[in-house]
Image (cartoon, rainbow, N blue to C red):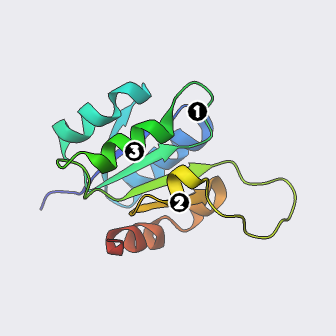
Amino acid sequence: MTKPLALVFYERLLPGSQLVNRLQDIQYRVQTVTAVEGLQAAAEEVKPMVVFADLGGVKGRIQEAITRLKENPATQHLPVIGFAADSKKPAPAKPAPAALAELPGVMQVGDAALLSYLPQLLDQAMQLD
């Protein structure tokens, strides 16, 4: 049986490499993307089951890349899980940035929650319309 494929874009080394290792631990194949500009082409080429995107990087324009994924008929069905650094101070849950909140199939999680609850997040992402 073929393992599911996850496409992962990350700029921050620690959470990105931890995510790749955790996905492999739960029997996913992983394809990484090192430049945000290559996310769309990679998604079309490798046809992943899910896309992970580092929202905390400083170099990329990840919101624009996610918008392109969601507007392209070949990739709009892909669930996208965005991850960012956890807040240092306790705060009430804050809404996602408007550009991401309006995109169906995009969920945002903190780095720690991503690694701790990865199987549950994958299940939830696959159920989003």
Residue in front for this viewpoint, 78 or 71: 71
The residue positioned 57% from the left and 43% from the top of the image is 55
Relative to 31, is 3 on the left or the right?
left
Q: CA distance from mark 3 to mark 1?
A: 24 Å
Q: Residues within 10 Å of mark 3 (few under 14, many from 20)?
A: some
Secondary structure at badge 3 equals helix
Secondary structure at badge 2 equals helix
The amino acid marked with disc number 3 is: Thr
Residue in front for this viewpoint, 109 or 61: 61
**Residue 53 image point, x, y percent:** 47, 44
Place residue 7 in its image quadrant: top left
Residue to which mark 2 is pinned? 101
Q: Is residue 116 visible?
A: yes
Identify the disc placed on residue 67: 3
Is mark 3 in CB contact (under 8 Å) with mark 1?
A: no
The amino acid marked with disc number 1 is: Leu
Residue to which mark 1 is pinned? 13
